Amino acid sequence: MRRLAAVLVAAVLLLAGCSDADEPVAEPSGSPTSPGAAATTPSPAPSRTPSSAPSASASPGPAYSDWELGVHVLPRTPAGFGEVRPTPKALRHRLFRTKDLLPPPADGRFHSTTGPVTPAIRERMGETWSPACPVGLADLRYLTVSFRGFDGAAHTGELVLAASEAEDVVSVFRALFAADYPIEEMRLPTTADLEAEPTGDGNDTAALVCRATRGATSWSAHAYGLAIDVNPFLNPYSKGEVVLPERASAYLDRSRTQPGIIHPGDLVVREFARIGWSWGGSWSSLKDYQHFTATGR
């Protein structure tokens, strides 16, 4: 039961957590990997007004969150999830610099690559995929796409998803990049995520994780590479007393308008709808504000 719950929690990539009495746990890390695929033609860089020279009256830069991600473990509930805790003050307006695991675009423009799941990438995926999963490696693709971080810089993210959806998904992230839509992190889930203790403050945008649907035994759309979770901390899953990530309760208030929070009719909702994907934030039996799916579930 605990192992199944750990796999379920991994879908939202719970990389960290906290209370004064909690014990630290190391944050999972990734290593840069060359995608080994041909890059697409870069899109033009968005026009930007040059910054003025520093002066005594210049406004200070953004105040980044001082919360330490991945260092405090939450107690587990009988269901195996972390205990839901109030959102820490430092995360009520979440703002972190993105750590580059892959080289960022040198020219600041949008770039993407699409290629097979190579042995090196397969090794990095670890137990997030196995031969028992409902989709074979030959039917998956490894993507890299440029994205805009909450730090304002251009970064390179990575996803594994169904080959049939790769081209359309790239077009979605191209549109989001052109609009400066912010994403905090986009890296492959790994075995370390599956095995990590619940910490409830992760925010990784990710696609394939071979797991069952929460609260059911059927395969999730994530197990087929047919779903993507976007900024999960800002857009949590909620059903009954379950909130995932467990420290994201403050973001169940959907009147919040800070960047990265998804609302009906937002660009990210429209772009996924354009390629035929639906949004879990429109469901009535539960709310999965981070979840976009090609299957309707």
Image (cartoon, rainbow, N blue to C red):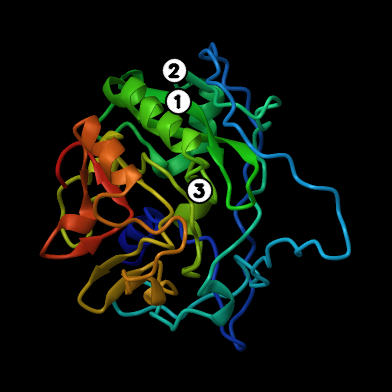
Q: Position of residue 49 (x, y in %)?
A: 67, 39
Q: Position of residue 140 (x, y in %)?
A: 35, 24
Element at label 3: loop
Q: Residues within 10 Å of mark 2 (few under 14, many from 20)?
A: some
- Viewer-proximal residue among 271 and 76: 271
Q: Nearer the viewer, mark 2 or mark 3?
A: 3
Picture residue at 38% right of the left edge, 76% below the top: 249
- Viewer-proximal residue among 278 and 163: 278
- List the single residue furthest toward the left: 285
Q: Is residue 80 visible?
A: no
Element at label 2: loop
Q: Which residue is mark 2?
A: 116
Q: Mark 2 is on which residue type?
A: Pro
Viewed as shown, does residue 118 lie left or right of 103?
A: left
Element at label 1: strand
Residue 103, image quadrant: top right
Picture residue at 55% right of the left edge, 26% below the top: 110
Q: Position of residue 268 (x, y in %)?
A: 34, 44
Q: Are marks 1 and 2 in contact (CB under 8 Å)?
A: yes
Q: Are marks 1 and 3 in contact (CB under 8 Å)?
A: no
Q: Mark 1 is on which residue type?
A: Tyr
Q: Residues within 10 Å of mark 1 (few under 14, many from 20)?
A: many
Name the mark on residue 183.
3
Q: Which residue is mark 1?
A: 142
Picture residue at 54% right of the left edge, 11% below the top: 38
